[in-house]
Amino acid sequence: MKTLPEPSPAPRYLERLVIREVGRVTLLPVEDVDWISAEDNYVQVHVGGPGHLLRQPLRELEARLDPERFVRIHRSTLVNLQRVQELRPLLHGEYQVILRDRTTLKLSRGYRERLGPLLAQG
């Protein structure tokens, strides 16, 4: 009798980010993150006010975050879909992404298709 292979477990995504700063380590729940921007081999994690610097390339962090919560809207920007309030069309297929805190980000043409279906789900 053949045994069926066990189903692979659902992928586990990051639940917290570990932010190391001089004199302390902060555990930041990913649901608190508004958006993330790339800065060379670092990312700036934006949470309400001032951001936190994390030494990790954006593409690596993106792979570890839940794609139903975080989506890339530009080559250097990830956004938490729960923070998106509205989209405003610009020229040439680009959009402004307005977050709840009124932060304005740019959705480039190349990433527009990723955002549309995800926003339609929620």
Image (tube, helix red, strand yellow):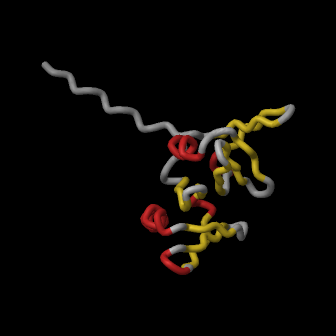
Report how many numbered discs are placed on residues in the image: 0
Query: Is 50 on the left or on the right of 120, as rendered?
Result: right
Classify 89 as above or below 102: below
Give the residue at the far right of this rendering: 23
Classify 50 as above or below 22: below
Residue displayed at 60% across by 57% down:
77
Query: Is 70 on the left or on the right of 105, as rendered?
Result: left
Classify 11 as above or below 76: above
85, 98: nearer the viewer? 98
Q: Quadrant of the N terminus?
A: top left
Give the residue at the far front of this rendering: 40
Quarter of the image where one finds residue 61: top right
Give the residue at the far top of this rendering: 1
115, 77: nearer the viewer? 77
Query: Is 64 on the left or on the right of 50, as rendered?
Result: left
Q: Position of residue 8 (x, y in %)?
A: 35, 32
Residue displayed at 60% across by 42% down:
57
Q: Position of residue 9 (x, y in %)?
A: 40, 33
Q: Position of residue 65 (x, y in %)?
A: 54, 45
Classify 68 as above or below 115: above
Q: Position of residue 67 (x, y in %)?
A: 49, 51
Query: Is 102 on the left or on the right of 73, as rendered?
Result: right
Quarter of the image where one finds residue 2: top left
Residue displayed at 60% across by 73% down:
96
Residue displayed at 60% across by 68% down:
106
Give the residue at the far left of this rendering: 1
